[in-house]
Image (cartoon, coloured by chain):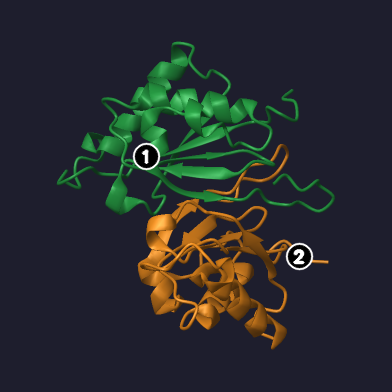
Chain colours: A green, B orange
Amino acid sequence: MQDQVNPVVTLHVCVTCRRGDEPLEPKDGRSGFKMQLALAEAISQGQAASIDLRPAECLSGCKRGCAVALVAPGKWSYVIADLDPECHAADILTFAEQYSSHPTGVPAWSERPAIVKKSILARVPPISLPGSEEAA
Amino acid sequence: MQDQVNPVVTLHVCVTCRRGDEPLEPKDGRSGFKMQLALAEAISQGQAASIDLRPAECLSGCKRGCAVALVAPGKWSYVIADLDPECHAADILTFAEQYSSHPTGVPAWSERPAIVKKSILARVPPISLPGSEEAA
């Protein structure tokens, strides 16, 4: 059972993202598909093991693929773009761990991995559910 | 009481957004601040009256201000950018009404206002709460 600071954190990975002039087919040749594999591999080796990794079809960050989104109840959502599956899986999972540990999902700027500092595409305030406390 | 198709929909408006070379001060001269006023005025006149309008400080869409975000339990979140408070308040509220009426918050593309079609900055899958049904 997760506690209030660490509810279930989901990392959505856009598996349809392409980088540069990558072709539409084959789909498993797309950088987004490779990013999903890279993240799953790192998680299977123990990094950010509590993160719920899920494939997504389009986060509307197409001009800046690859893109991922971090979400959790009561926390801000973050969409991070301009990612390279060859370089950034570990950094994304580091940020996911920081996000998981922060009560409202806003880790200190200075502690974030460099790619996260420069590649946040958007963030969204937490949903206020009926009866829930305002998080931010 | 809202039903499942129409839970409370929140429209977050970045009041710190600036367009072009707008100065930092005064804050109420920023386009984001003006967008909040324009949306509040339209809602007070009856458009999208069920929408919960809230000011936000930074949705990380700074390079593409003004920006707003639509969120609701069980629905995709949308961040929409490149907005002009002089032109787009009514279109955003039209999209908010379409979003409110759609079970998972994904209105048909063909029916969306033109500014929404071209200005979606990012979208985020709905949070799966423990015990809730997967929405998309």
Task: Find residue A109 and report its horizontal and vertical position in percent.
Answer: 50, 34
Q: CA distance from mark 2 to mark 1?
A: 40 Å
Task: Find residue A121 and report its horizontal and vertical position in percent.
Answer: 41, 48
Badge 1 local density, few (<14 within 10 Å), some, or many (20+)? few
Q: Nearer the viewer, mark 2 or mark 1?
A: 1
Q: Quadrant of residue B19?
A: bottom left
Query: Tag count in the figure?
Result: 2
State the residue in front, B57 or A77: B57
Q: Which residue is pictured at 20% across the width and 40% down the height?
A: A26
Task: Find residue A64 and report its horizontal and vertical position in percent.
Answer: 30, 48
Q: Which residue is pictured at 68% across the width and 31% down the height?
A: A7
State the residue in front, A109 or A33: A109
Q: Quadrant of residue B28?
A: bottom right
Task: Find residue A93 and report its horizontal and vertical position in percent.
Answer: 46, 24
State the residue in front, A119 or B125: A119
Write down the residue under mark 2.
B3
Q: Please check whether the numbered discs 2 and 1 fall on a single chain.
A: no
Tag 1: amino acid? Lys
Q: Secondary structure at mark 1?
A: helix
Q: Which residue is pictured at 73% across the width and 52% down the height?
A: A128
Q: Is residue B10 in view from this perspective?
A: no
User: Quadrant where the N terminus of chain B lies?
Assistant: bottom right
Q: Chain of mark 1?
A: A
Write down the residue under mark 1.
A118
Left/right placement of residue A9 relative to residue B64 reads: right
Residue farthest toward the top in the current orientation of the protein = A45
Q: Is residue A90 in view from this perspective?
A: yes
Tag 2: amino acid? Asp
| Above or below, A101 relative to B91 | above
Q: Chain of mark 2?
A: B
Q: Secondary structure at mark 2?
A: loop
Q: Which residue is pictured at 51% across the width and 69% down the height?
A: B30
